[in-house]
Amino acid sequence: MEFPEAYATIVKRSVERNTKELPTILSCLDFESLNCLEIGAGPLARLAAKISGFAKHIFCIENNKQTIKAIEKVIREQGLEKKITPVFYSPPIPYKLPFKDKEFDIVYGAWLPHKTATNPEFLDEITRVSRKHILLVMPGIKGDEPKLVSIVRPGELERRMQYRKQIKTYLESKGYDVDAKDEILRLDFQSEIEIRDVFYCMAFKNELTEPQKEKVNKFLGSRIHNFQDGFYCVYGTRID
């Protein structure tokens, strides 16, 4: 299974994204009538589509043309042309954003790779273009995935705790008042093959050896209908 299919399957199999993920995000910041930038909206633009009901306007930036086409399709189908603007941008300098300083009230991103979200150059840019608020929804510290990854890469829980601390410390150094909220989502996969294929891709980039697969399969086999997918929101408001 490749990333687009694995991503779509996770979204489809989650039974609580709209009842836990979205309310948690909205409880962190007030999006009402604000101009927003979403980093990495994904082909379904699912958060932008929901948040557009509150925000004044959302720009969704992506560096993949196929993803932009998928977002445009979602926007047309849901009649959100006046609320969401997709932006394709492949920066000549990594992480450089094509926007002015303090152009947006809120800059947010969801389920970004830890490598991206903890990179000082990325954080420099999102704080540069944000006038007031930053929100990042990150793969969680709680839940099953840190245990899963630790089968192959021991210490994943500790790494994720350090990542959250890095983001919080950085935002505070830039003059933000920072807080975080944790939540757990339940995923209901339909078969052992499906859950294996998804996490072979999403957690391990399809790079498992056969002995590693045996250990991963044993872990996932008991979690087909009850995988606990943790996330946290780290969010900050610039102190004026």
Image (spheres, rainbow, N blue to C red):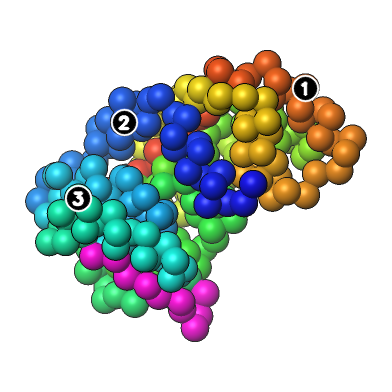
Q: Is residue 122 left or right of residue 219?
A: left
Per the image, the residue denoted by label 2 is 18
Is 24 one of the magenta-colored residues? no
Q: Amino acid at mark 2?
A: Asn
Whole-angstrom CA distance, mark 1 to mark 2, is 30 Å
Q: Residue at x 66, y 38 (%)?
A: 197
Q: Residue at x 50, y 80 (%)?
A: 93
Height in image: 132 above or below 1?
A: below
Q: Residues within 10 Å of mark 3 (few under 14, many from 20)?
A: few
Q: Amino acid at mark 3?
A: Gln
Whole-angstrom CA distance, mark 3 to mark 1, is 41 Å
Q: Quadrant of residue 131?
A: bottom left
Q: Does residue 39 show up?
A: no
Q: Nearer the viewer, mark 2 or mark 3?
A: 3
| Upstream in sequence: badge 1 or badge 2 | 2
At which x and y percent is residue 157? 65, 33
Q: Residues within 10 Å of mark 1 (few under 14, many from 20)?
A: few
Q: Does residue 100 show up?
A: yes
Per the image, the residue denoted by label 1 is 218
At which x and y percent is residue 155? 73, 35
- Callout 1 touching callout 2 (CB < 8 Å): no
Q: Residue at x 23, y 65 (%)?
A: 85
Q: Nearer the viewer, mark 3 or mark 1?
A: 3
Q: Residues within 10 Å of mark 2 (few under 14, many from 20)?
A: some
Per the image, the residue denoted by label 3 is 78
* Most distant residue in the right direction: 211
Q: Amino acid at mark 1?
A: Lys
Which residues, given as a range, are shown in magenta? Answer: 85-94
In the picture, the disc for residue 64 is none
- Callout 2 touching callout 3 (CB < 8 Å): no
| Upstream in sequence: badge 2 or badge 3 | 2
